Image (cartoon, helix red, strand yellow):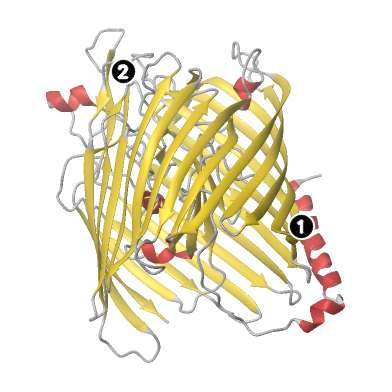
Amino acid sequence: MSFPSLFFQLIALFCALSSALAHDPDAEFVDVPEVSIIGARPVAASSQQFIPDKEYLLQPQGRPAQVLRLIPGMIAMEHSGGAGKADQYFLRGFDADHGTDVAFFADGMPINLRSHAHGQGYADLNFIIPETIEGLDVSKGAYLPEVGDFATAGAVNFRTREVLKEGVVQLSSGQFDTQRHLVMFSPTRDKVRSLIAAEGYYTNGPFQNDNRYFRANLLGKITMNPTGRSELSVTGTFHKAQWNASGEVPLRAVTAGTLDRFGSFDPSEGGNTTRSTARVNYHHDTTSGGRFFANAYGQYYKFDLYTNFTVLLNDPVNGDGLQQSDRRVVYGGDVGYRQAGRFLDLDSAVTVGVQTRVDDIHARLGTQVKRNPLGTTTDSDVMEASYSPFVKAEIQPVSWMRLVVGVRGEFFTFDVRNRCPACAGQATGRTTSGLALPKANMILGPWLATELFANYGEGYHSNDARSAVAPGSVPLARARTYEVGARSRPWGPEGVELVATLWAIDLQSELVLAGDSGTTEVRGSTTRRGLEVAARGQVWGPLSFNGSLAWSRARFENGTSVPNAPELTAYGALLLRWPEGLSSQIQATYLGVRSLDENLKAPAWVDIDLSERYRLPVTLPHGRMEAFLFVQNLLDTKWEQATFGFRSRLAGEPAGGIRDIHFVPGSPRFFMGGVAWYF
């Protein structure tokens, strides 16, 4: 059955189910006014949190991944001197590359792409319009049965809004020919809640060869209540981007003065991508404390990337340009039921569900010169599917203890077909793999406004299908995660919250970027240990604080350091809301020294940003006006984003090349400002 046919049949099924439930006599007596209930969200681990939009919407958004630094220990950075591709993610001792060990979702729809042409778990967040997000659900470790692939270090779910109280038209511009414009409004707000948003972004960046990065995003969402006890939401998005990239600059060339830090040896690097998504979310609440839920999604994706990591190492005549192309359709969903009540005279809730996903992929890697193809290295059709049943039980045996336990099953099929008979040794074949993953969480308290947590969970990341079908491979890399922690609000429910977490992760199979080929290689099992401390909340009156410090240690089984694994990260932000309509925020992000190999280290850096928003004292027939200013890298320090150690060869160098640090320069001081009309 084709994806469009399946997707629309699922929509029809949900609508039919809603219509049937509308004749439930119980449903005819629950048409009640809307009631807002504000309270703390129960969590299963000290590291689990919800980040509301008020903590990141002050500054004008250039990159959606900027909001991730609010997560303790997490940093996202540009990867190749061009903002159009997925960022590089760091969390809990992982250089997760583009998403191998961090799972991302939008309203429950997976964002990470399996067996991607550029890297396993590739997670491009640029299709998200930050202002459409009401908050982020964040979990770390593998403690939740609802979350599966790639959630080794953690998972982030971007929850979109249903409706806006005010529409907004926002215009902004800045240095380096940067512009960002946004329109967002709700045509209907009552029985049918709707949201429409459009974003356009362009920048040339600080590079000598203009980025010419263009991004366009559209989002449409409709939410309704077919009955008094059910809700149906349909969301569609469209994303298109194209860009030039400066690549990863060899440090030796910058030190010798032959290349500016914002220059490039191959100005033809860059790429383009398109992503269209559709998702349906449905639930129905019963009169007995139960909830039936069903969700479905579909995605069409297109990607072309042109890179040159090693310059002239492999081909001194044409250069080492690579072209990576990915075309795919992704579809899947989940269905389940949750029942809350009393069992054996205990407050409890049980959730049973199943998730499924199919990736229909055409991935290709070849050589190129100035974006003109030269030859084919690999060319594959991949059909990858997963089926994941799970069960979760939440039990409160006594008032000061909660237990959350569960198990998740995983069953994968990998089917790889070689489209290039002349490509020697290319993987082909079919295989299956499965796992059973137990989870256990214990929450004690609260005592003196403090809760204690102990957690154990087994998770995994899937490996690329083209390696999974090879003899002796590990298709699913199991991870065992452990955590103990505490959360406390010693100054009351409205005061600052303090969090401390001690954690450990044992991973069966580590994937490491091989810069000279643009691929990954398996390097065996690893162990990670770490500590996180964080504080967030209202310090005094209009002053709020959000800060964290995270330390980790990542080692292979032989004791050597895992390349690019962060050891120390920190984030701090002060937000002051002045009584005159002015809001000020200063943010500082720190990434410590990282080992690139036994001899090379990436330097530490600090980036300080300033955001200002002011409600203009002007009288308008409809709405209000705001002006805003954003200053990135306030102190104009020299810093490096993505940094790697590998061998490359420049003109005039020995045939074997030179092993060196290669980096993407961080932005110099950058000003961006604009106005917003709320109506």
* Outermost residue toward the left in this view: 257
Q: Is residue 418 visible?
A: yes
Seen from the viewer's position, the closer of residues 635 and 235 is 635
Disc on res. 497: none
Q: Secondary structure at mark 1?
A: strand
Q: Nearer the viewer, mark 2 or mark 1?
A: 1
Q: Residue type at mark 2: give it.
A: Ser
Percent of width and height locating residue 18 = 80, 69
Q: Residues within 10 Å of mark 1 (few under 14, many from 20)?
A: few
Q: Residues within 10 Å of mark 2 (few under 14, many from 20)?
A: many
* Outermost residue toward the top in this view: 655
Label 2 sits on residue = 648
Seen from the viewer's position, the closer of residues 408 and 324 is 408
Percent of width and height locating residue 210 = 28, 44
| Point 50% across, 65% down: residue | 40
Disc on res. 343: 1
